[in-house]
Image (spheres, helix red, strand yellow):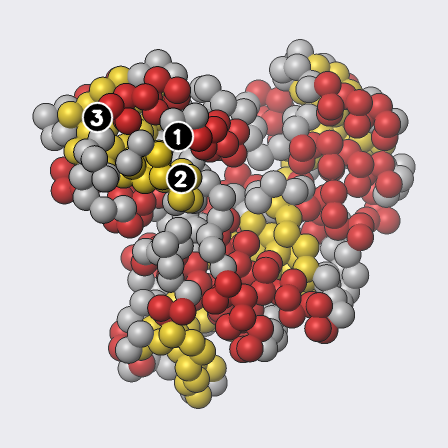
Amino acid sequence: MKPEELKGKAASIIGAGKSGVAAAGLLARAGAWPFVSEFGAVAPAAAEALRQLGVPFEEGGHSERVFDAALCVVSPGIPQTVPVIREMHARGIPVVSEIELASWFCPARVIGITGTDGKTTTATLIHKICESEGERQQYRAFSVGNIGIPFSSEVSAMTSADIAVLELSSYQLEGCFSFRPNIAVLTNVTPDHMDRYGGSIEAYAAAKFRIHAQQGAGDTLIYNHDDPILRAHFEQEEPRPFRVVRVSLRAETLDATPGDFVSVEEGEIVVRTSGSTEKLMRVDEIMKPGFRGDHNLYNVLSSVAAASAAGVLAETMRRVLAGFGGVEHRQEFAGHACGLDWINDSKATNVNALRQALQAVPAGMVLIAGGRDKGNDYSVIADIVREKVACIVAIGESREKIANAFRGIVTVLSAASLPEAVDLARRNARPGGSVLFSPACSSFDMFRDFEDRGRQFKQFVREQQ
């Protein structure tokens, strides 16, 4: 839909979170008549923002008024299966995500990043690289989307010279139909949100693949060639209308086949474009304590591929990558207290993210895990838990499920709160060892979000010192 077509149209927004309020503001500025409907209570800050915008809203349920609309914008946390959205579809009212809405207004080049794991780190790296290049080239780089700032809140400030670096969840992509990123990045696909997708990895992957559904000539798709689901999807024989760049930790697996890639060869990052291969920098110039592991190397390679596709100079990439120290809440060193290293990995909200953290931390650790389970299968990490973990402290709604999964493999303790978990970890850790906080679950049983959870963990660690 074109922005001018929204003028004078009624639009319902389901959900009064950050993206819902931002969508309401964007629609109001476009001359539409937005109405926000929240099933629960509207937060005071959101209510005040809507009043300032002059946007009417309701809370405590959805009235018949929501169906008096030419368009419905749904917040990402609301599944397509809830009654109000099913009724929207039944009445023929188009239902889109806030990302789709904002894309109608976006003049900037868009780099979209999705995947089960690594998308925040990859998006952060791409933004930092593009931001640094933009200082020289006189354009701005915006960091928006699932990373925390709604696309709709920033899109009106963008110009055609700018770059929007957009982190995308599967939930956000579900409601995208015409959204077309100039550069799309797929980091990996492993089981996550199985509660939302009926236990189907195929349904979850299909939502992720919407990132490239509208791409065409002149666009670039970057994917992790070492991920079996992505490799199977993109190695199908039908021709792709867009340029494809593969990412792999092993250049020798790509050398024999045509096409562009970013990989590692003899300890150096190499970039192949149009048959010509160039060395960028050594891996050991980037990897450091607090930013280590193969998963982070994949994030670096994807960032290099995206920045290269955006025309960023190699010297800019080298400078930013050499100075990068990681992302808050993703295997973040939280301090040395009581003779122990404490690691905050609150961003780990699924089993694969926990696996990556376990691979990066020395054996003999105490692991604090748990929260609101999303259909996790913990049996897939039993071997690495047996190898790397001395004791698990289970917290949150899933603590009984975690205890049942790992009892008999390692010692499992249960804590009713995060402060209690930190105390139990301290008392059960080996001198000179590590405590890893990597929940593998969402935070919503006990915390506002994963950031709130991670910051509380770091505060409790500081109190141990």
Q: Is residue 319 left or right of residue 420?
A: right
411 over 151 or under it: above or below: above
Q: From this viewpoint, which residue is outermost toward the bottom?
A: 276
Name the spot of residue 464 as percent of width and height, x first: 38, 27
Name the spot of residue 279 as percent of width and height, x first: 42, 82
Residue 182 in view, yes or no: no
Foreground pick, 433 / 86:
433
Question: Which residue in the protein does label 1 denote?
Answer: 465
Q: Residue at x 37, y 81 (%)?
A: 258
The kind of secondary structure element at disc 1 is loop
Mark 2 residue type: Gly
Question: Which residue in the protein does label 2 denote?
Answer: 335
Q: Residue at x 40, y 44 (%)?
A: 333
Question: Which residue in the protein does label 3 denote?
Answer: 428
Marks 2 and 1, how far apart in space? 9 Å
The reply to whether callout 2 and callout 1 are in contact (CB within 8 Å) is yes
- Which label number is shown at residue 437? none
